[in-house]
Amino acid sequence: MDGLPGDLEVPCAPMSLISWWGRTVGRRLNLVALYAMLGLALVIVVGVAGFAVGRTDERARHAATAVVLTGTVIMSNEGSRFIIFYPDGVVDPPNDADWVYYIVADGWVDASGTIHAEPTYPTCLAGEGESGLSTERRRVELTTIDWDHGGIQPMHVAVRVRCLD
């Protein structure tokens, strides 16, 4: 050899470079794969936790399912928009407080099927004179929800009224 620096290392250099490159890249690829798997696991855990939190009972407290009830209105107060309503099958219960419903419906349907979209009180529930109190028994169909307002029992709310007579 003519004494140039590195002459002795040249035949070994490509092998050592390839070996070094393979070890380095292999380690880096292993680290990248590890970080990718950890990131994916974190995304899955956060997603499952978010799904579980979204399905808790707290969400159910803010959702309402409407129920259609047919029965008899025993007493109606137009001023307060409260009625005492006995669903079919209920006959003179000992406590009328369990059967108080609050009318929030802006529209209603009269006995002939006409839809009234104005915010008036249903005529089948309206009382005589200034008091607006009626004790005349009337058959109605109510679409109701129960509002859990934190009291002893939920408040019954009628969101739709259909007069039957």
Image: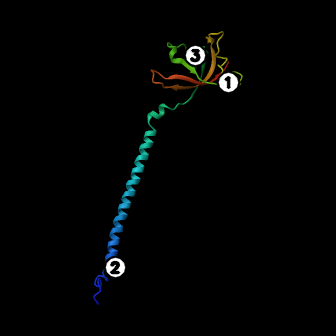
Q: Residue at x 64, y 12 (%)?
A: 127
Q: Quadrant of the N terminus?
A: bottom left
* Disc on the earlier residue, 1 or 3: 3
Q: Is residue 10 above or below residue 84?
A: below
Residue that mark 3 sits on: 80
Between 73 and 51, the residue placed more toward the observer is: 51
Residue that mark 1 sits on: 118
SS type, badge 1: loop
Provide residue 124's location: percent of width, then percent of height: 66, 17
Q: CA distance from mark 2 to mark 1?
A: 90 Å
**Given the image, on which type of amino acid does mark 2 rest?**
Pro
Provide residue 43's location: percent of width, then percent of height: 42, 50
Q: CA distance from mark 2 to mark 3?
A: 94 Å
SS type, badge 3: loop
Q: Residue at x 38, y 61 (%)?
A: 32
* Disc on the earlier residue, 2 or 1: 2
Residue that mark 2 sits on: 14
Q: Residue at x 32, y 79 (%)?
A: 13
Provide residue 9's location: percent of width, then percent of height: 29, 82
Provide residue 146's location: percent of width, then percent of height: 52, 25
SS type, badge 2: helix
**Given the image, on which type of amino acid does mark 1 rest?**
Glu
Q: CA distance from mark 1 to mark 3?
A: 18 Å
Q: Is residue 142 left or right of residue 18?
A: right
**Given the image, on which type of amino acid does mark 3 rest?**
Ser
Q: Is residue 138 above or below residue 14?
A: above
